[in-house]
Amino acid sequence: MRYTVRHVTRFSYESPISESVMEVRMQPRSDILQRCLHFSLTTTPASRVMMYQDHDGNTVHHFNIPARHTRMAVTAEALVECEESPPLPERLGADAWDQLQQVAGSGEAWDYLAPSTFTTPTTLLKAFIINAGVERGPDPLVTLRRLMAEMFARFEYSPRSTRVDSPIDDALQSKRGVCQDFAHIFISIAKQLGVPSRYVSGYLFHDPSSSERSGEGATHAWVECLLPEIGWVGLDPTNNLVATDRHIRVALGRDYADVPPTRGVYKGSSKVNNELAVAVRVGPARSVLSGEVVPFTPWMSRDASPPLRDNEGLDAQQQQQ
């Protein structure tokens, strides 16, 4: 399946600032089951956008606007091709837990087993594990599926109930949150069980016939777990489903702190009026004609397309819908 993605982020300031420096993680990844066929990133005011790859293989664009401005817009547009993953088995082999123990002992997945900024165990997390009866089941895959189902049943999906920097205790205490919270809680528990797990930021194409509870018009977050015999498996605790070809992967990390869509600083004494105003559109793309070549644009330096109107689904937080 091919998708087009348009992701617009806008900033406004109470008074002019003299410089903005920012890095962006918005380019979909290219790997075995997903290919980014085209990508462009533009800014208003215009800037020269550069790029590099971080240690997790995520593409990071960065730019500097050394001029006075009161507004800034960052527009990312992509054409992505996604393939469906092979179906998962009902369960793994009898020695799956032993194989995971060997992986842990080797140190190769240390980053995805150790606590991180948003996945450090807490007293409330331990209480949830006990109350939900979460423990090692017959094998890791069965256990993780049961954990997804428990979280789906016990937590309410509630937009704007948390912030992008909320600790897991906020969602654990209120029993509600958004995709970012659910991903962090799931990763925290999976690590406690001994399953290497990582955070995935990206987009979800919403099928009108589906019943996903995560909203449209924003980025999405889910989890990937390393399982014997299979490799990394995508699990979406927000919607209680295994990741499909409708999940468009952008960046991988230990948690949100590693892969925010935008991160930067500005020079000046002004306050940000709207810390983030985000609009995301994901839709199916037409098939590329035979012999047609789709250009890949790593960076562009021109004025961005006109910002979306205020009534076109702007939201005040990323990965919160």
Image (cartoon, rainbow, N blue to C red):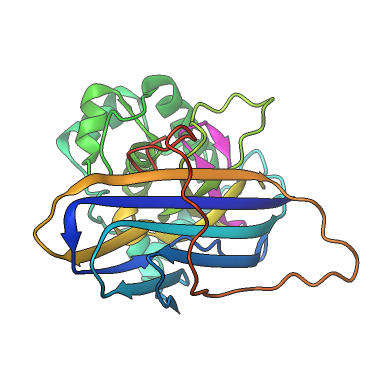
Residue 122 seen from this side: yes
Q: Position of residue 165 (x, y in %)?
A: 23, 46
In which quadrant will I find the C terminus? top left
User: For this view, does 199 lie left or right of residue 41?
Assistant: left
Residue extending farthest right: 290
Q: Position of residue 242 (x, y in %)?
A: 59, 40
Rendered view: 269 above or below 53: above
Q: Position of residue 145 (x, y in %)?
A: 52, 35
Quadrant of the rendered image containing residue 232: bottom right
Q: Residue at x 18, y 40 (%)?
A: 122
Q: Residue at x 42, y 59 (%)?
A: 74
Residue extending farthest left: 269
Relative depth, front residue between 252 and 320:
320
Q: Residue at x 27, y 50 (%)?
A: 12
- Residue 239 lies in the magenta-colored region: yes
Quadrant of the rendered image containing residue 284: top right
Residue 244 seen from this side: no
- Residue 91 lies in the magenta-colored region: no
Rendered view: 241 above or below 72: above
Which range is magenta?
229-244
User: For this view, does 132 lie left or right of residue 248?
Assistant: left
Rendered view: 86 above or below 268: above
Q: Position of residue 199 (x, y in %)?
A: 41, 53
Relative depth, front residue between 41 and 212:
41
Q: Residue at x 50, y 71 (%)?
A: 302
